[in-house]
Amino acid sequence: MTTTDTALRITRSRGPLIGALVTLLGLAGAAWFWVVHPQDLPVDGRERTARTPTGAPVYLGIARTDRTIHITGVRLQVEASAPVEVRLLRCVGGDVQVTTDPSAFCTDLEDPSGHALAPADSLIVEVTGEAAGAAYIRPPQISFTDGLQRGTRRAGSPAVVTIVGR
């Protein structure tokens, strides 16, 4: 009779380890997707229009939000038939449709970058032209954080300003 020595070898299956890694990667991917895809900001397709004489500023409300966000940057696209100066401002505690004096509607005006934009606040543009012409301002593209989420979204309304000679 012959006996053969056979060593008993016990190995672990790698299936559970691979399954756990796939699950962790899936959860990390879902978390990353959630962080960089915040809820859209309100968009209003109604165009704001204003008419102002050369050299006189006019203020138009272009964006509001339905929740408090922290603004990290705002990009405005302006197309104009004559040179215009466009300045973006945060109207604290108010909203402006079209006016030549925003102090009646806003408790303070400031650069919006680095500040929170609350539902009671709005973004406005100050437009001044030194020559007759027109300016078209697209809805702003706002970079922001909302809690742990961050993103860049269009918000608000487009605006058209006609600048007439005096």
Image: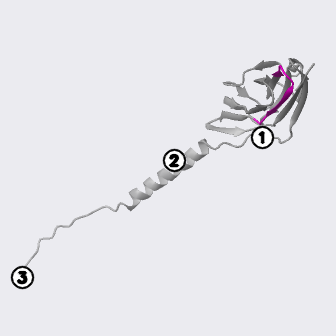
- The residue sitting at the left extreme is 1
Q: What's under tag 1, amino acid-wise?
A: Pro
Please check the rendered image and state whether residue 136 is part of the magenta-colored stretch, yes or no. Answer: yes
Q: Quadrant of residue 10?
A: bottom left
- Quarter holding the C terminus is top right
- Name the residue that disc number 2 marks: 28
Q: CA distance from mark 2 to mark 3?
A: 60 Å
Which residue occupies 39% across, 56% down?
17
Residue 159 percent coordinates (x, y): 83, 34
Does label 1 or label 3 sit earlier along the sequence? 3
Disc number placed over residue 1 in the picture, else none: 3
Residue 95 visible in the displayed image: no
Q: CA distance from mark 1 to mark 2?
A: 29 Å
- The residue sitting at the right extreme is 166
Q: Nearer the viewer, mark 1 or mark 3?
A: 1
Would you place residue 127 above or below residue 152 in this image?
Answer: above
Q: Marks 2 and 1: in contact by CB < 8 Å?
A: no
- Name the residue that disc number 1 marks: 42
Does label 1 or label 2 sit earlier along the sequence? 2
Which residue occupies 72% across, 21% down?
111
Residue 72 percent coordinates (x, y): 65, 29
Determine whether, in the image, residue 157 is placed left or right of residue 20: right
Q: What's under tag 2, amino acid-wise?
A: Ala
Which residue occupies 51% across, 53% down?
26
Please check the rendered image and state whether residue 137 is part of the magenta-colored stretch, yes or no. Answer: yes
Determine whether, in the image, residue 79 is placed left or right of residue 166: left
Determine whether, in the image, residue 162 is placed left or right of residue 26: right
**Residue range corresponding to the magenta coloring:** 128-139
Residue 113 visible in the displayed image: yes
